[in-house]
Amino acid sequence: MKNLIDIMQMSTDELQELIDRALDIIANPAKYAESCRGKKLATLFFEPSTRTRLSFEAAMYELGGNVIGFSEAKSSSAAKGESVADTVRTVGCYADIIAMRHPKEGAPLVATRTAGVPVVNAGDGGHNHPTQTLADLLTIYREKGTFDNLTVGLCGDLKFGRTVHSLISAMSRYKGVKFVLISPEELKVPRYIITDVLEANGIPYEEVTSLEEAMPQLDILYMTRVQRERFFNEADYLRLKDTYILTPEKLRTAKESLSILHPLPRVNEISVAVDDDPRACYFKQVLNGKYMRMALILKLLEVNV
């Protein structure tokens, strides 16, 4: 694997190898502290980000490497009309690996054709976000010890939520997994994911509108925000943004073993009163994302420790 654009590029064996490496990094941080000395990561973020960009940067610094890049399109030559292909070809002359976020689906794939160095998709529009999925998978694995025989509820914006699309694809390869897709009609999972991923592989799923009714059966609850930036119509966003708000009351029928995930940032879809619930895992996810990005950087740079 030379780049990571889509989580489905990685086999389940490769995912487990990355998870095992991340667990070793957690257990033995000093062993990895100088493993990328002399290497540079370029973070090319054409779209705003806090966690993903800083997580990549923290990952590279903790491996002993350095970071260059930009955090918004207007601070790059894209503001002058430079193409993605030319930008990454230029940056590939300065860096050993590139992490790229872009509002247009497919932009990181285009980047792989000219970069000359490994490219990691750090989110492309409403399409894919594979390193968030790596964070999600490590969180699930550390909480449950397995990916098999889990009922996974995904709640909120399932239409534009790229983290949802990537997680469904990744989890669909494990035994006994069932999905409960919880959303308003307007924000249902895209039809191609239903047909090409779930139905094509005989994976059980149900589409519902009620979080409360779905709650008792869930092992994982993956909350998402309704994303203002994906809407063309402000009125539609305002009408749908408060459809699902997770509160302690709504968790009364949930399993004691439930794990609550959220890719963040949250707006108001999880009450802060839930943060102290031992089932809340979303800030653990943030930390797990750094460890998985460290493992990924080592893999793509072919660094042996």
Image: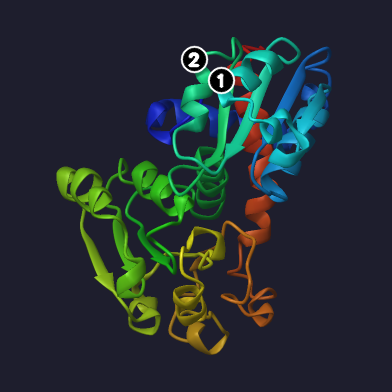
- Residue sitting at x 61%, y 68%: 280
- Circle 2: is it few (<14), some (14-19), or many (20+) Cα within 10 Å? few
Against 197, residue 271 (above or below) is: below
State how far apart marks 1 and 2 are (Cα).
Answer: 8 Å
- Which residue in the structure is indicated by mark 2? 113
First in sequence, mark 1 or 2: give its number: 1
Position in image of residue 74 (x %, y %):
73, 40
Residue 47, given in percent of the width and then of the height, sits at: 64, 45
Give the residue pinned by disc 1.
Answer: 85
| Element on which disc 2 rests | loop
- x 80%, y 26%: residue: 68
Position in image of residue 78 (x %, y %): 67, 32
> From the viewer's perspective, is 269 left or right of 110?
right
Kind of residue sitting beneath label 1: Ala
Question: On residue 195, which mark appears?
Answer: none
Q: Most extreme residue toward the front, as rendered?
A: 80
Residue 61 drawn above or below residue 201: above
> Nearer the viewer's eye, disc 1 or disc 2?
1
Q: To which quarter of the image does residue 267 belong?
A: bottom right
The answer to whether mark 1 and mark 2 are in CB contact below 8 A is yes
- For numbered disc 1, what is the local secondary structure? helix
Q: Nearer the viewer, residue 229 or 139?
A: 229
Q: Residue at x 46, y 63 (%)?
A: 232
Location of residue 281 (image quadrant): bottom right
- Of residue 179 and residue 164, the one placed in the foreground of this image is 164
